[in-house]
């Protein structure tokens, strides 16, 4: 038997157009995939509120087993994938940096490198090269991207010390001027 008649639309179709069903005599669902999908879609559209209530009721009734399964599943996959990710990113640091730059500042690694080249790889504020060491990689850190926290516009690349210093003053020019005045008064 290579065809079967759908009991919903009454059309004979190939067996691959029916879902497998162990409980059915033929081993295939009584309805074709298209009819089944259509009926389920219509049911979900017409009974949204009831479905929401049923899901909430089911969740409240089975909360402990749901959480236990979720935790087990998370641990199983998280450990597996985090180890694979660590290995991948360790072998491809440029991809890691590019993703971080795109996520945090909306620029590519190529744009970052262009900025660094324009600044001769030195801090825009103090004019020195980065001196901090990244303890995780035991390498010299790269210059930090300085940006306006309101507009998101990139102002330049700074060494870690200058970047942290500006951050501590929260980009407040009045506070910075006050600090300058303080230093001048107490030379």
Image (tube, rainbow, N blue to C red):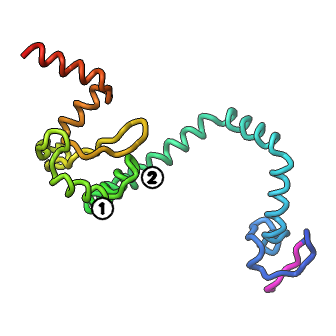
Observer-nearest of 39 and 66:
39
Task: Judge left or right: residue 99 versus residue 39.
Answer: left
For the residues labelled 2 and 1, the Cα–Cα distance comes to: 33 Å
Q: How many labels does the image show?
A: 2
Please report the residue visible at 74 percent of the width from the left and 78 percent of the height from the top. 16
Question: Is residue 9 toward the left or the right of residue 186 in the image?
Answer: right
Which quarter of the image is occupied by the C terminus? top left
- Mark 1: few, some, or many residues within 10 Å (few <14, many ≥20)? few
Compared to residue 40, the image places residue 172 above or below, namely: above
- Position of the N terminus by quadrant: bottom right
* Residue 60 placement: quadrant: top right
The mark lying in front, picked from 2 and 1, is 1
Q: Picture quarter containing residue 175?
A: top left
Q: Residue at x 40, y 51 (%)?
A: 106
In the displayed structure, 143 sits above or below 22; it is above
- Image coords of residue 81 (percent x, y): 40, 55
Which residue is at 32% across, 26% downward? 172
* Residue 50 image-quadrant placement: top right
Q: Where is residue 70 in the image (x, y as percent from the top left)?
A: 54, 43
Q: Between residue 77 and residue 138, name the one nearer to us.
A: 138
Label 2: state its secondary structure: helix
In magenta stretch: residue 43:
no
> Residue 182 location, x and y as percent?
17, 15
For the magenta stretch, what is the residue range?
1-6
Query: Toward the viewer: 137 or 103?
Result: 103
Q: Mark 1 points at which residue?
A: 110
Residue at 13% across, 18% down: 183
């Amino acid at each position: 038997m290579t065809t079967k008649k759908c009991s919903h639309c009454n059309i004979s179709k190939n067996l691959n157009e029916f879902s497998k069903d162990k409980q059915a005599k033929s081993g295939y669902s009584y309805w074709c995939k298209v009819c089944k999908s259509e009926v389920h879609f219509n049911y979900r559209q017409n009974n949204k509120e009831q479905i929401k209530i049923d899901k909430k009721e089911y969740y409240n009734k089975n909360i402990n087993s749901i959480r236990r399964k979720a935790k087990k599943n998370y641990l199983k996959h998280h450990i597996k994938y985090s180890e694979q990710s660590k290995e991948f990113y360790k072998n491809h640091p440029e991809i890691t940096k590019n993703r971080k730059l795109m996520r945090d500042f909306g620029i590519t690694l190529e744009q970052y490198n262009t900025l660094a080249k324009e600044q001769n790889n030195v801090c825009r504020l103090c004019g020195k090269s980065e001196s901090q060491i990244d303890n995780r990689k035991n390498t010299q850190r790269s210059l930090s991207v300085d940006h306006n926290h309101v507009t998101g516009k990139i102002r330049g690349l700074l060494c870690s010390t200058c970047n942290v210093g500006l951050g501590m003053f929260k980009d407040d020019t009045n506070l910075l001027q006050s600090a300058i005045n303080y230093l001048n008064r107490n030379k």
